[in-house]
């Protein structure tokens, strides 16, 4: 093993706050995926974002191989292990492989706490770490690692074992007069600034990303447009877990929200919110709408900045 001489560790402050305390019961009324998949078959990828996307789409884990050009043990593994067909035959079908140059991607080095090279981190399709291996390995040892890893693909379907709560209100995005209305007509400024669910007025309407939002006054509307991202929910209220794992845009429930990096996200189920809270960066960062099944239902996803 070789110590990383200059690993950069980034401290990220993450605020995750369930908003069950915001009680809506007291409201006041007023590149193609197929092409990318082919590129992963039998090959190591160099892009973490591409590997993550394929892991989620195929519902199989991915292995992050951290290395460096100056690492002798890494170079030995390169030819004697990683390039061997007995290893590459797993790639793209049973596991997604991505090689990370530690010198070129210090953010990932920090994110996964890498201090020695080579190090491998196996991550499930739900973003949770499955296994970690520090140091080089023989070909036989490495194939044993892979066999163990492919038996732990993560959560295949977040909602498969959970019945939807009939009391949840999945009304954050509604159609009205042919237009998409955000937050079901509730005022985003009152929700974020005052922590109150209050219906906006038809007299004060503003559009952002093609979604109409209702306000109680012209002052609130002006406040909104001065800094819209401060008030607009992530994905305008669509569930990021469903978008990532199921490739569908589904409206979250008023009762199920969580904060990440100052943005409020909503979810279709408590389990989805729990998955998000366990690893918010996996679901909220680098979101993609490629291959989404229902783009016509939520056309704003095609043009908006998802991050």
Image (cartoon, grey):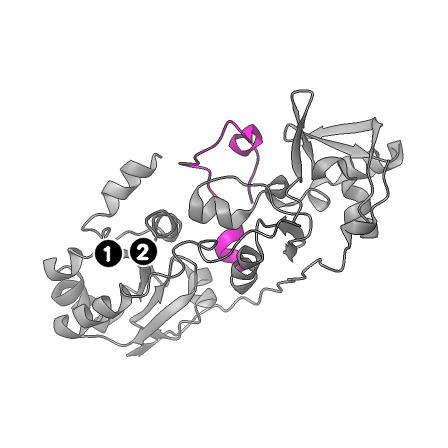
Whether residue 75 can be seen here: yes
Q: Is residue 295 magenta?
A: yes
The reply, left or right, for residue 172 in relation to residue 307 is right
Vertical order, 293 against 165 (above or below): above
> Looking at the image, which is closer to me, 197 or 83?
197
The residue positioned 51% from the left and 62% from the top of the image is 279
Q: Is residue 137 magenta?
A: no
Q: Could you classify mark 1 by the number of other residues whose Cα lies within 10 Å: few (under 14), some (14-19), or many (20 or more)?
A: many
Which region shows up in magenta?
Answer: 280-307
Which residue is farthest top?
177
Disc 2 to disc 1, C-alpha distance = 6 Å
> Looking at the image, which is closer to me, 160 or 113?
160
Q: Main secondary structure of the magenta part?
A: loop
Q: Could you classify mark 2 by the number of other residues whose Cα lies within 10 Å: few (under 14), some (14-19), or many (20 or more)?
A: many
The tag earlier along the polypeptide, 2 or 1, is 2
Q: Secondary structure at mark 1?
A: loop
Pointer 1: what residue? 94
> Of the numbered discs in the image, which one, if any, rests on residue 29?
none
- Residue 117 pos. (x, y %): 31, 73
The reply, left or right, for residue 184 in relation to residue 244 is right
Query: Do the CB atoms of the residues marked 2 and 1 lie less than 8 Å apart?
Result: yes
Question: Where the C terminus falls, by quadrant?
Answer: top right
- Residue 153 pos. (x, y %): 33, 61
Whether residue 285 can be seen here: no
> Of the numbered discs in the image, which one, if any, rests on residue 60?
2
């Amino acid at each position: 093993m070789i110590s990383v001489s200059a690993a950069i560790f980034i401290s990220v402050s993450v605020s995750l706050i369930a908003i069950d305390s915001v009680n809506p019961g007291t409201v006041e009324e007023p590149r193609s995926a197929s092409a990318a998949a082919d590129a992963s078959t039998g090959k190591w990828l160099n892009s973490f974002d591409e590997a993550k996307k394929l892991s989620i789409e195929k519902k199989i884990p991915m292995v992050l191989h951290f290395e460096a050009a100056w690492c002798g043990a890494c170079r030995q593994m390169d030819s004697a292990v990683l390039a061997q067909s007995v290893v590459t035959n797993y790639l793209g079908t049973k596991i997604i492989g991505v090689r990370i140059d530690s010198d070129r991607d210090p953010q990932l080095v920090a994110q996964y706490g890498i201090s020695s090279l080579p190090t491998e981190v196996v991550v499930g399709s739900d973003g949770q770490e499955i296994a970690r291996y520090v140091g080089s390995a023989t070909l036989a040892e490495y194939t044993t690692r892979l066999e163990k890893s492919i038996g732990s693909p993560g959560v295949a379907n977040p909602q498969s074992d959970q019945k939807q709560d009939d009391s949840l209100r999945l009304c954050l995005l509604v159609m009205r007069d042919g237009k998409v209305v955000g937050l079901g007509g509730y005022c985003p400024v009152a929700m974020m600034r005052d922590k109150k669910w209050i219906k906006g007025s038809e007299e004060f309407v503003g559009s952002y990303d093609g979604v109409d939002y209702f306000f109680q006054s012209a002052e609130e509307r002006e406040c909104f447009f001065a800094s819209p991202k401060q008030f607009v929910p992530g994905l305008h209220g669509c569930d990021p877990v469903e978008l990532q794992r199921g490739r569908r845009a589904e409206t979250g429930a008023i009762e199920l929200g969580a904060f990440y990096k100052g943005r409020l996200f909503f979810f279709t189920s408590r389990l989805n919110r729990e998955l998000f809270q366990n690893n918010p960066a996996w679901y909220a960062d680098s979101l993609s709408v490629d291959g989404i099944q229902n783009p016509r239902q939520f056309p704003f996803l095609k043009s908006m900045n998802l991050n």
